[in-house]
Image: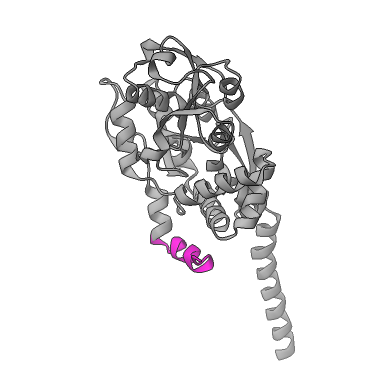
Amino acid sequence: MRRGVVVLMRALLWLALVLTVVPAQAAEPVSFKVGEASPANTFLAIWMAEDAGFYQAQGLKLEIVPMVGGRESGPELKAGNIQLMHIGMSSVVRANLAGGNLRTIGSLSNVIRQTMFTAPGIKSAADLKGGTVGISSTGSESDSATTLALRRLGLTRQDVVIKEIGVDRFAPVREGKVAATMLGEPSRSQAFAAGLNPIVDLYAEHIPWLFSGLTVDRTYLNGHRDVLTRFMKATIEGNYLAISDARRAKAVLAKELKLRDPKIIDLSYANFKAETPPNAEIDRRGAENILAAVAPANASHRLDDYIDMSISDGLRAEGFIRAMQRKYPTR
């Protein structure tokens, strides 16, 4: 009798283990699409996390969707065609002004990382006046940064022709198809190597700016907080891995950006390592600067209408950030 009870107890224990383990193993990963506004080194944390399998470990099936940027982010997020957009807060301000309800929940760059380069033969503001300045798309960070750069030159947007030319802007300015454009890494280093004129270097000014945000629709945020928390955990770990393993990070950077020149790869990685916020946390000063520069008088000037730091706060409170710091100690 006693032996029968023992057998029964073992059977029940085995059944309990099956019921708790098998569903977790059999669960389908959650589809998670990320809009990529512009291939750049600011995306390295996401590429690293995908390469290392961190999203898969968090139960996510990541898909990177190439997009133009500024003007597409609001409608695509609202429609659910993507779950998150890698975009600066300038786009969030404009999207919300147009009726959107976006929130930036994290950041992969809290300073402007672009320089305005001019085409061969254009050396001064006087040469630039009346010329065409290329941007990726209306509402993008290249658009906002262009306005700031023109101010440094004593010019306004009315003094030039602003033209959308897409994310690949190095070739057009080098070939003289546009008079000037803003470039970030790796195109910035390529432009220096090609001898183009850096007429305004905003990166050198180190201006606080929510330059590369992780942005979602507020409705999705409210209904899928757990999914977004898992995405943030994987992305932050991707950041830490990239910072701690330079060799692997450079290999991923070269692959994703199709880079072959070791010097350009080194410069792009050095820029990433110097400027990426390891914990993907938002610098409120950068968000405030964008509101001051971009938001018109009829727009809300409350930061909470554009950013949501609750997931970052939760990760810090639960000890996740401390765990990452222990796992990837600074060398």
Q: Is residue 29 above or below residue 9?
A: above
Magenta: main secondary structure equals helix
Left or right of 3 in this view: 167: left
Whether residue 100 appears in this view of the structure is no
* Residue 305 lies in the magenta stretch: no
Residue at position x 46%, y 27% in the image: 142
Whether residue 267 appears in this view of the structure is yes
Which of these two is toward me, 149 or 14? 149
Percent of width and height locating residue 90:
40, 29
For residue 89, what is the image quadrant? top left
Left or right of 165 in this view: 251: right
Q: Is residue 1 above or below residue 28?
A: below
Percent of width and height locating residue 53:
66, 54
For residue 261, what is the image quadrant? top right
Residue at position x 30%, y 42% in the image: 285
Which of these two is toward me, 18 or 192? 192
Bounds of the magenta span?
317-331
Left or right of 287 in this view: 23: right
Percent of width and height locating residue 133:
48, 17
